[in-house]
Image: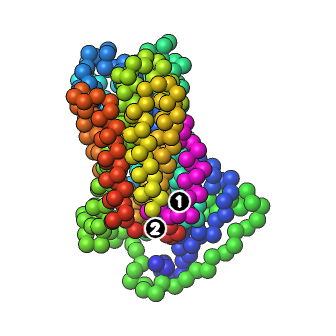
Amino acid sequence: MSVMLNNNPRVRISDRLERLPHAPYLILLGGLVLMANFIENIDMHGLGYLLPVLSQYWHMDPKITGYLGSTNFIGMFFGAITCGYLADRFGRKPVLMAAMVIWGIAGLLFAMSWSVQAVFICRFIFGVGMGAQVPVATSMLSEMVPSRLRAKYIAFFIATLPLGIAASGLLNFLFFPYLGWRGMFVLEALFALWVVVLWKYLPESALWLEFKGRYSEADKSMTQLEKGIEKNIGRTLPAVEAKYSDNPDQEIDPETAKKYSTFRELFSRRYIKTTIMCTIWMSTTMMAYYGLGTWLTSLLVLKGFVVIKSIGYVSLINLGGIPAFFLISYLVEKIGRKWLIVIMAVLTAVTAYVYGQSTVYAMVIATGLLYMFCQHGLNQSNQAYLPELFETRLRGSGVGYTSACGRLGAASGSIIIGYLLASYGPSAVMVFALAINLLSAVTIAVLGHETKGKVF
């Protein structure tokens, strides 16, 4: 939609955005969001490494331990489902910052827990902040770059996941013997201070400001980006022709914009197919990944590995996700989003099952690296696809709703795996992971549509 303001033509933010070259300033702004996701992953996955220790300290059996793992994801469900609406209503940046403050404070409180009940409550609040951060950060990053660079930046965003998990494992491996579990959670919570950097240097999404009718602020935010890039490349960016709207009635004023972003529109005839797909797809994907990821260290302990070595092995195999970035960032543009997700979901299902059958050190490392390569490749493909399924006015709500479904899946996955371990052992867990990853692949194949090259 071309926009007019006071009967004068105005250049759309999307037109200005699409002409931007890849430059260090664009990388810098994207890096602020990427770093926020990196440290969030360090903190979030610290629980998975220390779950066996907490289980012993608080005398929890596998079922109760499973509930502890799921409590985090239940909190993330509430964070994700509310943050989408709030980000569409009040902006990407303030909601992103608030999310980091919440999980940082909750992490400190978790380290000071005095009872099992306090552990569960603090972890729930921690999850609220974590659940709010990821979908808002994804939406914001996807709105900061031209469409031709979007998949690459989202791939970078997801690449911080294996790096964060590996860094969390390395920190626990090096410092847990000296700090104990309480000290480790204090250390990880302090990373939330990155919010100060975001507050000072990260601009608000110009696309969101434009949709809200806050045109002067949108222009200021976009101009800041353009000037930073012009300074990098040493020349003025090419001009964009201002266009008159074909339909002046489509001009959006701030009050009208508030009414447009409604959560119930996700269930309208226009979006219901996409919403159904997102519900099944993200629930099953996150059920497999986070449900299983929470238990990876415990699974190795149950196979006879000691805790500290298990932490080291899980940290090491997560590095298998790093090479996936280089391949997926290419394939997501070559093959497209939809069918790449289907392929990676099938490969993740198979490698998860094979990893589960490994019993010796060499096989654990080799099959674990393959599994993490496929799993993180799937995550990168998912996150490149998700923001493109919704328009700017509904992106926060759509991504937030889908992420919330994923958190419910992750929470139930952690509980289900706890029961499977207690009743049937580690092998049953991998059969479960195989089945739900295949269900995710079928869902995308049947209900998905391609979004490659979509301009916001």
Q: Give the dominant element type of the magenta stretch: helix, strand or loop.
A: helix
N-terminal label among 1 and 2: 1
Q: Residue at x 44, y 68 (%)?
A: 450
- 376 or 301, which is in the foreground? 301
Task: List the residue tagged with mark 2.
Answer: 451
Q: Residue 185 location in percent, x, y?
A: 42, 24
Residue segment shown in magenta: 319-338
Q: Residue at x 64, y 65 (%)?
A: 20
Task: List the residue tagged with mark 1.
Answer: 332
Q: Amino acid at mark 1?
A: Val
Position of residue 14 relative to residue 72, above or below, is below
Whether the magenta-drawn stretch holds residue 332 is answered as yes
Q: For numbered disc 2, what is the local secondary structure?
A: loop
Q: For numbered disc 1, what is the local secondary structure?
A: helix
In the image, which is nearer the foreground, mark 1 or mark 2? 1
Residue 288: mark in rendering = none
Counting every numbered tag in the picture gives 2
- 3 or 434, which is in the foreground? 434
Q: Residue 16 location in percent, x, y?
A: 59, 70
